[in-house]
Image: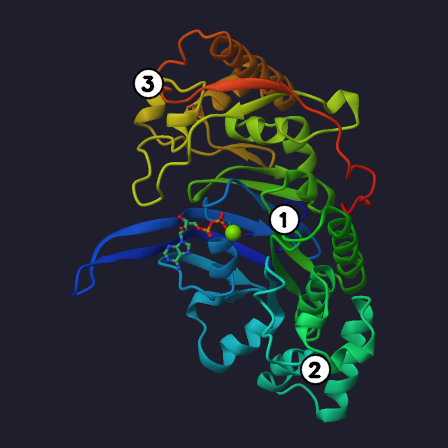
Amino acid sequence: MTTRNGEPPILEVRGLETHFPIRRGLLRRTVGAVRAVDGVNLDLRRGRTLGIVGESGCGKTTVGRSILRLVEPTAGTIRFAGEDVLATNGAALRRLRRRMQIVFQDPYGSLNPRLTVRAILEEGLVIHGLGDAAARAERMRSALDRTGMPAASLERYPHEFSGGQRQRIAIARALVLEPEFVVLDEPVSALDVSIQAQVINLLVELREQFGLTYLFISHDLSVVEHIADEVAVMYLGRVVEHGSTDQLARAPLHPYTHALFSAVPHVDPTRRRRRIVLVGDVPSPSHPPAGCRFHPRCPLAEPACRTIDPPATDLDGHVVHCHVAARLLEQCDGDGARAAARMAEAMAGMAGMTAAGAAPAQDAAPAGLAIQQAGSHAREGELRRGGS
Ligand SMILES: Nc1ncnc2c1ncn2[C@@H]1O[C@H](COP(=O)(O)OP(=O)(O)O)[C@@H](O)[C@H]1O
Ligand code: SF4
Ligand SMILES: [Mg+2]
């Protein structure tokens, strides 16, 4: 498959499923499965950044880890630079893994406290047989320099550094292997807000310098908006909407995306929206609801949503899985902006009902909505725009 500009994607994920067995009893018999990722499709072009957003537990980390085979997928296909990742093993998988790196959320847990920075950075170089001792030392110094860390850091231990510095070291550990693709799993979520902006700006610079492709996982949409060219919104193991960052921010079509983006505060008055707060927890991924998985929390749920899984509606690369969105698009002759405005009106109408104490939306119990006015945001303006 090729993307819209005719170039084959560097990453192509089809029907990805990663289920974790639930075992019980002395014999550890399998009694069920956590369907952490349950049918995900993604395409990513070289040099682009795809943001994956969604509430905690929706499967973001499992998607990232599955692509790198840090967990074994149950079904689906993953192609990276034309290679079939799931059919690759042994030395070929090691070679692929050098090209695909990951930076984890927790800069405290992800660096071995007993190793010096030199040992941490050198480990991958040795495993992959990259260079002699002198060449490795030069690569490590260069990677540290690129991430703004002095070469003297090599002889120190992780505990001697702040959270932001540790995350720079974790980024250097990924970079030292000269990857093409990096999964960034909530890379700034554990950092102070002031440090988050610096690390995001560093990631943007590195992407431009090295032509890197990122999968940027975050529950924080304001961060994703700054770095991602496109966004996939996940809910309960599935992607419910996927499009350019601008399409999703300005004309979201899925009710869940509406709720997520309404919570992002903006200094730009044209982008300020009434805040829609979803009520209720995400259902367990071991027993996902039938039909549309969002229906127990969706204020617009209709009887069909309980039984019929909404298929993809594709509006020039902007893909949404929602019966109501599909109908609105049809009524608006495929005009995404108008359909999104109609969806926003419908959401606000239902939110108004619930906030005023009227009965919640039909078939939506125990869903409910409340409206808040979004405030200003301290980080706005501190971050440099990352999109290309
Ligand atoms: N190794 C595992 N074994 C069993 N369940 C897991 C494992 N890893 C994740 N899960 C479950 O899979 C679901 C998705 O988890 P995760 O991918 O970490 O979500 P997110 O990153 O969006 O918070 C959650 O219900 C989580 O508890
Ligand atoms: S309107 Fe129906 S299909 Fe659309 S998100 Fe709500 S429950 Fe799902
Ligand atoms: Mg996670």
Q: Residue at x 61, y 80 (%)?
A: 124
In the foreground, 31 or 157: 157
* Residue 76 located left or right of residue 116: left
The CA span between labels 2 and 3 is: 60 Å
Question: How far separated are the C-alphas under marks 1 and 3?
Answer: 33 Å
In this rendering, the answer to whether 139 lies above or below 367 is below
The image's mark for residue 118 is 2
* Mark closest to the chain's N terminus, 1 or 3: 1
> Which residue is denoted by mark 3 in the rendering?
303
- Check disc 3: other Cα within 10 Å, few if <14, some if 14-19, many if 20+: few
Which mark is in front, 1 or 2? 2
Mark 2 Cα shell of 10 Å, populated few (<14), some (14-19), many (≥20) = many
Q: Secondary structure at mark 2?
A: helix
Colour style of the rendered protein structure: rainbow
- Disc 3, SS: helix
Q: Nearer the viewer, residue 320 or 346?
A: 346
Q: Are marks 2 and 3 in contact (CB under 8 Å)?
A: no
Question: What SS does tag 1 mark?
Answer: strand
| Kind of residue at badge 3 | Pro
Residue 354: percent from the left, percent from the top?
Answer: 47, 12
Q: Earlier in the sequence, mark 1 or mark 2?
A: 1
**Whole-number angstrom distance, CA of label 1 to CA of label 2:** 31 Å
Residue drawn at x 58%, y 43% is: 219
Question: Is 388 drawn above or below residue 249 in the view shown?
Answer: below
Q: Quadrant of residue 285?
A: top left
Say if mark 1 contacts mark 3, CB within 8 Å.
no
- Mark 1 sits on what residue? 50
Where residue 122 sits: x, y (%)?
66, 83
* Residue 351 coordinates in the image, percent (x, y): 52, 14
Label drawn at residue 88: none
